Image (tube, rainbow, N blue to C red):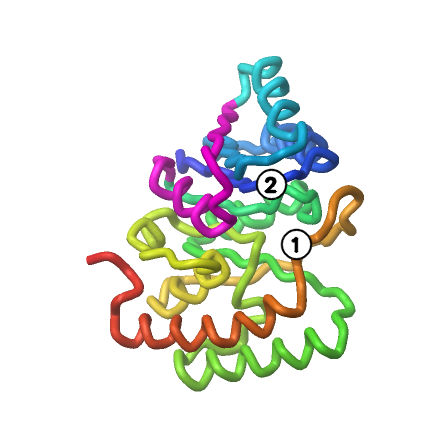
Amino acid sequence: MKKITVVIPFFNEEGNILRLLKDLVNELSQINGFNCEVFLIDDCSTDNGKNLVKSFIEKNKKNKIQIIENEHNIGKTFSIAKAINQIDSDFLLFMDGDYQDDPKDIKKFLDKVSAGYDLVIGYQDKDYSFFIKFCGTIYKAILNVFLGIKNVKNPSPQFMLIKHDNIKNIIFKENYHRYIAISAMHKKIKFCEVKVNFFKREHGVSKFSRFKVFGAFFEVIGLIYRLKKDIFFLK
C-alpha cells in the first residue's frame, strides 16, 4: 500500500488552519487503498494557529498527524525542504494552510497515482487578471523554449502530488518550492494535470504580491541555468 503524506506549511493562519485540518482528516478517512498521513510545518507563527493544531492532534490521536515547529521564521521554501528531508513516504501532496485548496480534490490526485503518474498538478480554471495572464504566457513560453516544457496549464503549482524520490535531492534556494514541478518535468517523469477547486481566503492576509511575479522571472533564469548545468539536484 502506497504511503501518501499531505504536507502543509503555514504561517499565521489561525482563522484557516484548523478548519482545513478538520475537513482534510475527514476526507482522508474516506480514502481506501492508500496509507495517508498529515505533516504540518509551523513557520514560527505569532498567532494561535499552531496551538489550535496541537490541541486538535492531542484530541485525535488515532489520526496520523504531526507538526514540527521552526525555531525561527525560515520561509515557505525552506519549511518544505525541511519536511522533505524528515518525511519517509512514497508520495508527497502539497497544500497551503490558507484553505484555498479543497481537500475533496485529493481523491482526484490519488486516482492518477493509481493510474501510474509520478507527478499530479492541480490547476484552477478561474478568471485571472490581464496582468497574471500576460505574465503566465511569457513564463510558459520561456519554459517551452529553454526547457522543452509545454502544454502545461500550471507549471508552478501550490497544490500538487509528487513521488518523493523525485525531489529528495533538490538543492533548495529561496522560493524554489515554486519550481519543484518544473524540475520533475525536466527529468521527464510521467505527469498529468487535474482541475481543482479554488476557495477565496476567508481569514488573514494573502502573501501574494505583484513584486513576487517580477522577481520570479529573475529566479527562472537561475533555475534554467542550474537545470541545464545539472546542478539543481545533489549528486
Say which of 78 and 181 sits in front.
78
| Quadrant assignment for the N terminus | top left
Quarter assignment of residue 82: top left
Say which of 221 and 164 sits in front.
221
Say which of 49 and 23 sits in front.
49
Mark 2 neighbour class, 10 Å CA radius: few under 14, some 14 to 19, many 20 or more? many
Three-letter code for the amino acid on which mark 2 is drawn: Phe
On the rendered structure, is 18 left or right of 232?
right
Instruction: Find out whether the residues at labels 1 and 2 contact each other: C-beta distance under 8 Å.
Output: yes
Q: Decide which of tag 1 and tag 2 comes sooner along the chain.
A: 2
Instruction: Give how far apart the Cα atoms at labels 1 and 2 are.
Output: 10 Å
Residue depicted at 46% across the width and 44% down the height: 79
Residue depicted at 70% across the width and 53% down the height: 206
Image location (x, y in percent) of residue 65: 52, 26
Mark 1 neighbour class, 10 Å CA radius: few under 14, some 14 to 19, many 20 or more? few
Image location (x, y in percent) of residue 231: 26, 67
On the rendered structure, is 61 left or right of 83?
right
Q: Is residue 79 located in the magenta-colored stretch of the structure?
A: yes
Image location (x, y in percent) of residue 187: 33, 66
The image shows residue 85, relative to residue 155, as above or below, that is above
Residue depicted at 69% across the width and 43% down the height: 99
Say which of 190 and 141 sits in front.
141
On the rendered structure, is 231 left or right of 5?
left
Residue, disc 1: 207
Image location (x, y in percent) of residue 181: 46, 61
Q: Is residue 202 located in the magenta-colored stretch of the structure?
A: no
For the record, the magenta segment spans: 64-89
Residue furthest left in the image: 235
Tag 2, which secondary structure? loop
Three-letter code for the amino acid on which mark 1 is drawn: Lys
Quarter assignment of residue 50: top right
Residue, disc 2: 11
